[in-house]
């Protein structure tokens, strides 16, 4: 665990042992843990004990034929001709395009099984702060995707995050988790294996990219793509990047011609301030609503920060400064939920954290 903050926290909640190679015979090896992220799909495969991470994107030609999926489809994003539609089927953390999500899930699962689908069990991470219908859609997706699902179980995403961070969530009290993903940030308080509070807000890497694209357009009359915006902000977080300047290429609005421009680190961090504020404000709201006994535990442990976009340069420091809590940053922020699902699948003591959602929202 990496630490942000003045005092090193020695009082983290009881830890599981991530490297422990304990295999419980109570699960079939043809079992998958699925984290359907807006940007990345993560699939834990119990047979290989590995996590597949691919872009959760599909490319459809002439409205009917899938021509690429995952990272290959992402290569076409913002570059494809008008008869090829490259899209993300998950939006704001929920399933927005069920047909294409089914197609994607089937394709990835089939690849994981070497091309032939066999009856399998699925553990799916679901967000807490969404409607019952939206939660049920995760179950329906796996049931209807044609993946030969035998058992479909749900695990609250924040619970999986906690386990993936190495926290023994069943025996820990007052744990705050902030998962900053692509379309969403989920802020949750866990205690004794349950969720006390959870709030899903529509801020994450996507909002960061959009803010950069709009600011560059406004300030420099330059149109840049979302991928460019992302690579600029990620490059500023890379310690090997020096000089405090990134070059971007785009189209000049006035002349219509391609052009390049240098963006400074100060410009980009100024642009992201507002999004950071939204995250900080929502963390504060959740803390205000937390029962006092749990607040005391959270104060002792600090908060746990995960999700790909939690790595955004300056975010952890900003949270630490404003919320006055130690910030424990995940070692594998993109994979945390999937690592937690792996714990639920592999360890009998965590299996009760998974539940069946059949009948939910009916
Ligand atoms: N080093 C980095 N610095 C900043 N941002 C990063 C870095 N690495 C990845 N990201 C961002 O992380 C985001 C993807 O994270 P993640 O996979 O956790 O999202 P997701 O689970 O698909 O989304 P959501 O949880 O909102 O549905 C992208 O916006 C990406 O730009
Ligand atoms: Mg996510």
Image (cartoon, rainbow, N blue to C red):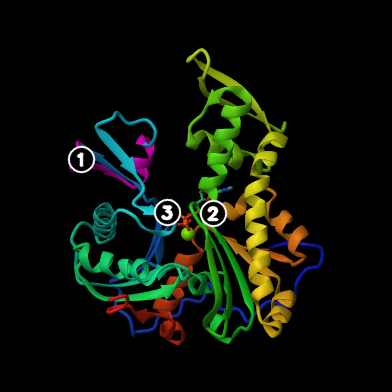
Instruction: Indicate left or right for 271 with 156 as reference.
Output: right
Q: Find the magenta span and give its range.
A: 62-76
Residue closer to the observer: 10 or 84: 84
Up-down: is 221 above or below 243?
above
Q: Which mark is residue 38?
A: 3
Whether ligand 1 has any atom under 8 Å from the Cβ at mark 3 is answered as: yes
Residue 346, image x, y percentages: 41, 78
Q: Secondary structure at mark 3?
A: loop
Label located before the other in sequence (1 or 3)? 3
Q: Secondary structure at mark 2?
A: helix
Up-down: is 123 above or below 51?
below
Identify the residue shown where x is 48% and y is 66%: 337
- For label 1, the residue is 63
Label located before the other in sequence (1 or 2)? 1
Answer whether residue 1 is visible to the viewer in this image.
no
Q: Are marks 1 and 2 in contact (CB under 8 Å)?
A: no
Label located before the other in sequence (3 or 2)? 3
Tell whether position 72 is magenta: yes
Residue 68, image x, y percentages: 27, 42
Nearest-to-viewer mark from 3 and 2: 3
Q: Secondary structure at mark 1?
A: loop
Q: Residues within 10 Å of mark 3 (few under 14, many from 20)?
A: many
Identify the residue shown where x is 69% and y is 41%: 269
């Amino acid at each position: 665990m990496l630490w942000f903050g003045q005092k090193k926290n020695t009082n983290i909640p009881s830890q599981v042992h991530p490297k422990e190679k304990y295999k419980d015979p109570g699960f079939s090896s043809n079992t998958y843990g699925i984290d359907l992220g807006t940007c990345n799909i993560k699939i834990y495969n119990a047979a290989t004990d590995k996590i597949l991470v691919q872009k959760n994107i599909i490319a459809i030609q002439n409205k009917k034929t899938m021509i690429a999926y995952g990272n290959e489809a992402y290569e076409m994003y913002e570059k494809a001709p008008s008869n090829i539609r490259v899209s993300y089927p998950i939006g704001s953390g929920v399933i927005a395009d069920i047909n294409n999500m089914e197609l994607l899930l089937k394709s990835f699962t089939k690849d994981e099984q070497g091309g032939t689908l066999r009856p399998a069990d699925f553990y799916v991470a679901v967000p807490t702060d969404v409607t019952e219908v939206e939660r049920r859609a995760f179950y329906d997706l796996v049931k209807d995707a044609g993946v030969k699902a035998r058992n479909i179980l749900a695990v609250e995403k924040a619970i999986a995050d906690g386990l993936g961070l190495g926290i023994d969530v069943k025996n820990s009290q007052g744990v705050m988790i902030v998962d900053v993903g692509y379309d969403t940030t989920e802020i949750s308080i866990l205690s004794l294996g349950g969720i006390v509070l959870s709030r899903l807000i529509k801020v994450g890497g996507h909002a960061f990219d959009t803010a950069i694209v709009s600011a560059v357009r406004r300030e420099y009359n330059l149109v840049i793509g979302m991928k460019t915006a992302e690579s600029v902000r990620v490059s500023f977080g890379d310690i090997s990047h020096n000089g405090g300047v990134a070059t971007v290429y785009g189209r000049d609005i006035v002349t219509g011609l391609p052009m390049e421009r240098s963006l400074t680190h100060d410009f980009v961090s100024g642009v992201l301030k507002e999004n950071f504020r939204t995250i900080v404000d929502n963390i504060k709201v959740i803390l205000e609503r937390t029962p006092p006994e749990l607040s005391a535990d959270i104060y002792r442990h600090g908060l746990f920060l995960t999700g790909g976009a939690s790595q955004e340069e300056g975010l952890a420091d900003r949270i630490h400064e404003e919320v006055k809590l130690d910030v424990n940053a995940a070692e594998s922020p993109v994979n945390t939920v999937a690592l937690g699902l792996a714990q639920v699948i592999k360890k009998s003591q965590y299996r009760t954290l998974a539940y069946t959602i059949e009948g939910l929202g009916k």
